[in-house]
Image: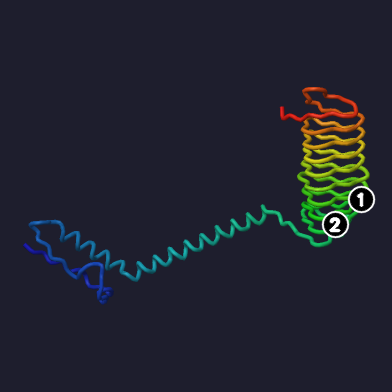
Amino acid sequence: VNCVVSPPVSSFDNYKKSSFENYATVRLTECPGMCIVLANMGRMARACGPIQVRDDMKKCAMLLLACLSVVGAAFAADAETKTPKVDLIAPVDLSVTGDSEVDVVGLRLGIWAECRQFTGLDLNIGGTAADAYGLQIALIRNEVRDKAGAIQIAIGQNKTSDMRGLQLALWNEATLLSGLQIGLLNTANDVRGLQIGLINATDTMYGYQFGVINVIRSSPYLPFTLLFNTVLSED
């Protein structure tokens, strides 16, 4: 037995190519329900039509692009607010107090100037920086809160957290020192190098002390000596 399914006529019948044939012939003895299935699928395909499908896909794509644009703008605004802007001043910085969010490359002249990172020559009554690389000369005080690869010269005090270089002042202070301290009072937590002064004091040391009073608190030999002290072991 043959069954011919003729789908209803609609405006989309004018299309030469369709997802379904205009009719379907099926042997009922082989698949009894195929006529009904093909008929329903044909009606659904012609009810939707290729133009409507394409329009829906375009709408979905436009909506997705809009969502991605909004999310991208939000991430960009968030990154801008979290990342502080750091200005660069070169080759000369003339200031009274400076700016903690400014990098200086070159010459810095100030009274009590501050900057984020300094590279070059620093001439101040009192200079402060987060990091310093170069030569610092101050009448009263040089201070580097983090790392310094520099030569620090001051009448009053040189103070640095991680010092790699030379400190020359009445009072030199460093948390970590890899280099040389020369002054009346030299203090540090850890020294890899040399201390020369009236009083030299450190917690741990790999190097030498020359002074009237020399203190190496963790020394396995003599924590306190006069004129000279040394520790040349990592223990």
Residue nearest the viewer, comparing 231 with 109: 231
Instruction: Decide which of 210, 105 is in the foreground and name it.
Output: 210
**Quadrant into which the N terminus falls:** bottom left
Mark 1 or 2 closer to N-term?
2
- Please give the residue where the numbered disc 1 appears in the rendered image: 125
Residue at image location 85% in from the left, 53% down from the top: 122
Relative image position of residue 97 (x, y in whole percent): 87, 53
Secondary structure of the residue carrying tag 1 is strand
Where is 235 relative to 33, above or below?
above
Left or right? Give the position of 145 relative to 198. Answer: left
Residue 157, by quadrant, is top right
Question: Residue 63 placed where, x, y %?
Answer: 47, 63
Whole-percent x and y of residue 143?
84, 45
On screen, residue 133 above or below 179: below
Query: What separation in Å lies between label 1 and label 2 (alpha carbons)?
Result: 11 Å
Q: Nearer the viewer, residue 207 or 149?
A: 207
Identify which residue, 17 or 119, lies in the foreground.
Answer: 119
- What amino acid does circle 1 point to? Ile
Amino acid type for the residue under numbered disc 2: Arg
How busy is the neighbourhood of tag 1: few (under 14 within 10 Å), some, or many (20 plus)? some
Residue assigned mark 2: 108
Above or below for 198 versus 102: above
Q: Position of residue 26 (x, y in %)?
A: 12, 62
Q: What's the colour scheme?
A: rainbow
Q: Quadrant of residue 9?
A: bottom left
- Name the residue rendered at 85%, 39% in the picture: 181
At horizontal 44% and vertical 64% (from top left) the residue drawn is 61
- Extreme-top residue of the structure: 221
Horizontally, residue 88 falls left or right of residue 52, namely right
